[in-house]
């Protein structure tokens, strides 16, 4: 489903305003776009991100949920919703969204990484280790995964293993 030119132009302009910090203008443009196509999950996802940035989490969450409702098979909607929950320290909900991404797109290494962060925050150390190791299989020199594996090793009193991860 390709947006028609006026909608495409609105979305492009809204995204540019969002990127340059013109949040009120971006919000107005996204709202205009939504008036043209309220069933477009990409518009809801963009609005969710903007509302999150504007410190309006309840409105952001409404739009994240709408994007997921409209496009339940869209990994990006689950990923962005997961990031929102992660930033809000709702690690269980974030983990669920990252695992949804992985069910749809198993090679999504960022979802693997963030699922690992959620597991670590929830003291699910074995799951965190498995997820961070899976990241390294795809991205062998991923510094963040190595650092987290090192931190995990320290938590488990495995000093030498921690040093090995920190020095890779």
Image: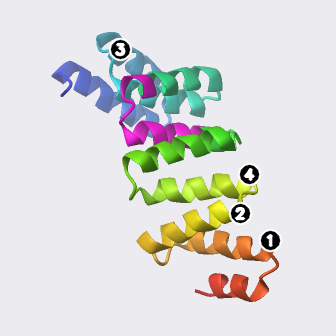
Pointer 4 local density, CA inside 10 Å: few below 14, some 14–19, many at least 20:
some
Q: CA distance from mark 4 to mark 2?
A: 8 Å
Q: CA distance from mark 1 to mark 3?
A: 48 Å
Is 117 situated left or right of 38 in this image? Answer: right
Q: Earlier in the sequence, mark 4 or mark 3?
A: 3
Is 74 colored magenta in this rendering? yes
Q: Position of residue 55 (x, y in %)?
A: 65, 29
SS of the residue under disc 1: helix
Q: Look at 19% across and 27% down and name the residue there.
A: 1
Is 122 situated left or right of 138 in this image? Answer: right
Q: Position of residue 29 (x, y in %)?
A: 38, 20
Return the residue at label 2: 125
Q: Look at 52% across and 36% down and name the residue there.
A: 81
Q: Nearer the viewer, mark 4 or mark 3?
A: 4
Is 164 situated left or right of 4 in this image? Answer: right
Q: Earlier in the sequence, mark 1 or mark 4?
A: 4
Return the residue at label 3: 38
């Amino acid at each position: 489903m390709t947006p028609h030119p006026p909608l495409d132009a609105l979305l492009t302009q809204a995204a540019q305003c969002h990127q340059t910090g013109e949040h009120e203008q971006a919000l107005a443009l996204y709202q205009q776009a939504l008036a043209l196509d309220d069933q477009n999950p990409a518009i809801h996802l963009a609005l969710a991100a903007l509302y999150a940035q504007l410190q309006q989490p309840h409105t952001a969450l409404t739009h994240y949920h709408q994007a997921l409702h409209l496009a339940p098979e869209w990994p990006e909607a689950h990923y962005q919703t997961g990031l929102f929950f992660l930033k809000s320290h709702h690690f269980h909900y974030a983990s669920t969204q990252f695992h949804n991404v992985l069910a749809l797109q198993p090679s999504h290494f960022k979802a693997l990484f963030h699922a690992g962060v959620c597991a670590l925050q929830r003291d699910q150390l074995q799951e965190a280790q498995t997820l961070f190791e899976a990241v390294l299989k795809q991205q062998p020199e991923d510094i963040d995964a190595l650092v987290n594996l090192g931190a995990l090793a320290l938590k488990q009193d495995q000093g030498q293993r921690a040093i090995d991860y920190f020095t890779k």
